[in-house]
Amino acid sequence: MTKFSGPKPDEKEKIRASISIKGKVQGVGFRPFVYRLAKSLGLRGRVNNSSQGVYIEAEGTHFQLEEFLRRLEKEKPSCSSISDLESSFLAPLGYLDFQINKTEDEGKKTTLIPPDMAICRDCLSEIFDSQDRRYQYPFTNCTYCGPRFSIITGLPYDRANTSMQDFEMCKNCREEYNTPENRRFHAQPNACHDCGPYLELWNLEREVVCTHHKALLYAVEAIRAGAIVAVKGLGGFHLMVDAQNKKAVQTLRKGKLRKSKPLALMYPNIEKIAHHCEVSELEKKLLLSPAAPIVLLLRKQNIYNWVSPQNPYFGIMLPYTPLHALIMSELQSPLVVTSGNIAEEPICTNENQALEKLAGLAQFFLVHNRRISHRVDDSIARIIRNREMVIRRARGYTQPVSLPINSPPILAVGSHLKNTVAIAVSGNAFVSQHIGNLETAETHESFSEAIAGFKKLYDLSPEQVVCDTHPDYQSTRFAKSLGLPLLPVQHHYAHILSCMAENRLSDPLLGISWDGSGYGMDKTIWGGEFLKITKTTFERVAHFRTFSLPGNEKAVQEPRRAALGLLFEIYQEKAFHFQNLAPLQAFSQQEKTILQTMLEKKLNTPRTSSVGRIFDALASLLNLCQISEFEGQAATLLEFSLEKDIEEAYPIALIQSLNQPLVVDWQLMFEKIIEDICHRVAVPLIVAKFHNSLVEAIIQVTKWTKENTIALSGGCFQNKYLTEYAVRRLEEEGFSPYWHQYIPPNDEGISLGQIFAACRLQNMEGSK
């Protein structure tokens, strides 16, 4: 938003424009851009970073300044964004030239943290040019690329506030840094062979095998020979192995306790990716973007099945640092590049930690001496309905979400699984990088570090903390321990609010929140919710019919238990007579006897309305998955097995009771599914009809509520077919659907929803 104040003077009179810019304007080449633009227009004055953003004073004629303001927004660097621009016309001070001044570090810290950006074309060209002084230098960067968030230690973003303060620039780098016309003008991580970080290759005895480019070449040869190499990257360690070497990949899986979960691949270039996968123009653009996430691409060749078992997609990224680019240039073949951790632990960020945790996996460690200030995983995204959807938000993504109120500092601690935290600062919500599942002491430590990091960066003392209503979440317990005013927010309400905040939606609307589980207001497990959003809260207007989960948490890991609970809901004790159905065959007779007793006597069998568990039940009935090896496995197997271009659907009933939410009853659907299974109907057809039935349930409930604006959120809407078909059908029926793009629909979005809930309450209180 641009705001102008002050009278318009005579066109030829020299005046001064005082300009304050907020947004993503630090670490992205914004000040050099301002300098060059001002000089080209003959303006005099200054530009500097501040804790709030960028501040400019420019003197010239009214025409020159109007042109300057117009071009500021139109021609700004591609990696930058302007959230607010305020300009006042004042009397001139008599500047003699236009300069870039020293950063001002006063006032409240509100500027946006710059994201880590993938290596640009110019830097890539330099590291492969034998005549360039940065030839083969693995830490090459400039104003338009390189590390940012992963090295920052404070705001504003200057070298003294990064881990690059450990390295004093040589004469040549200093000259580049101080020359406004140079691409490296005020590039804070600027370095070269003579003055910057360098590589070392360590063995398991912590001995330095070799250094600099020799270390890289040795690591490449080790990978070629089938070794697993731990490589210190941008925001943490990667484990790298030759994707073509089945035995080496299986060894990696065994060591990481990751039996069948897909592993990410790095390819040397787009051309080689296109040889193995379908790559649309949008997917290509995403792969080549400054964020450079892992992108889910449909395979067109049946290769490397050990990398992505039972999955038609590969998660693929391009080299996004000069270190990766140099490694891939030597190999010229795909690498498995996966997080340097074990199971659900956080990725390692320093050498000693990596040697301790990964010594049983990696044979060599390619390390460097640039400190990582913030742990950052690789982001994951896919294209859904012709636009990007971020599934894991980490490297490359730091943009905040605007809030409807300039609230006091608020901390939101997020959910238990796929945790992120968020803070509210001066009208913006800043969501942390992906932290993970708070089920290990190491991840909880990472969670605490992320909160401490936010508080330090923004010099923040939260006045309120927001958490999930689940009393046993680690994040909830942490929130309670802070002794601050506490606001618990229901899980699925937070999901919808995150979608509303991202899409800048206002109430009233219908939120459809489908996921695996969340603590319900009636103390049951919710997960198939239709919520009418009002000014400050919500009404549960509809939900899926509930059923019992024998074994509670065990049922989350074992789809066969969800199937058994659903069958018991329909058939009671007769459910155990279906001996030909896959979930019954998946248990021993003794186990079935115990489970039947549990269901009949309601022992440790909580009720759930979860659509995620309904997906699990179907996957078990179709014998696609009886025991999950990773979260969401059953649902993804269903998505990957469905037959497209099928319009048929199973029947779904709506049950209405006085003063009670509408109930979406799936019994008729599952009775028909069981009939189809018994008649050996093809699995892809059953799965397609199932998905279509869920979408038709959305249409029926939406028509019943008479709300026009629809927000889709929750982990179930990571499903490409479900989301695209739901959006299409809603639009066909005249509704306005919204879904996620940069904030994941899964539990990573919960912290943003929690912040938004607090702001909505404050907004209402302020309007009284």
Image (cartoon, rainbow, N blue to C red):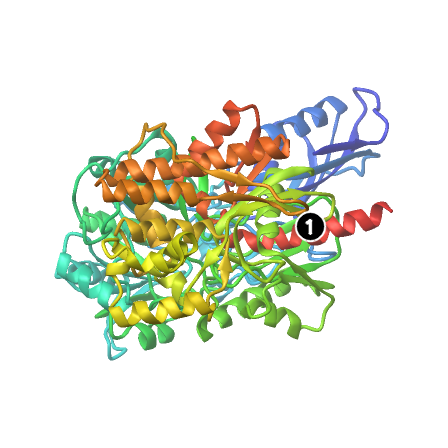
**Where residue 725 sits: x, y (%)?**
43, 32
Q: Determine the image quadrant of residue 505.
A: top right
Q: Secondary structure at mark 1?
A: loop
Q: Is residue 370 left or right of residue 222?
A: right
Q: Which residue is mark 1?
A: 52
Q: Is residue 203 left or right of residue 529?
A: left
Q: Determine the image quadrant of residue 260.
A: bottom left
Q: Is residue 550 above or below residue 48?
A: below
**Where residue 187 sits: x, y (%)?**
50, 49
Q: Work out whether residue 12 or residue 190 is closer to the camera in this orientation and state it.
A: 190
**Which residue is outermost to the top?**
11
**Where residue 190 sits: x, y (%)?**
46, 53
Q: Work out whether residue 52 or residue 538 is closer to the camera in this orientation and state it.
A: 538
- Dividing the image into 4 quarters, which one contains the N terminus? top right
Q: Determine the image quadrant of residue 276.
A: top left
Q: Is residue 388 visible?
A: yes
Q: Residue at x 70, y 37 (%)?
A: 85
**Where residue 623 sits: x, y (%)?**
25, 52
Q: Is residue 133 visible?
A: no
Q: Residues within 10 Å of mark 1 (few under 14, many from 20)?
A: many
Q: Work out whether residue 178 or residue 121 is closer to the camera in this orientation and state it.
A: 121
The amino acid marked with disc number 1 is Gln
Q: Residue at x 17, y 64 (%)?
A: 227
How many numbered circles does the render carry?
1
Q: Residue at x 24, y 60 (%)?
A: 585
Q: Is residue 527 left or right of residue 282?
A: right
Q: Is residue 297 above or below residue 263?
A: above
Q: Work out whether residue 173 or residue 721 is closer to the camera in this orientation and state it.
A: 721
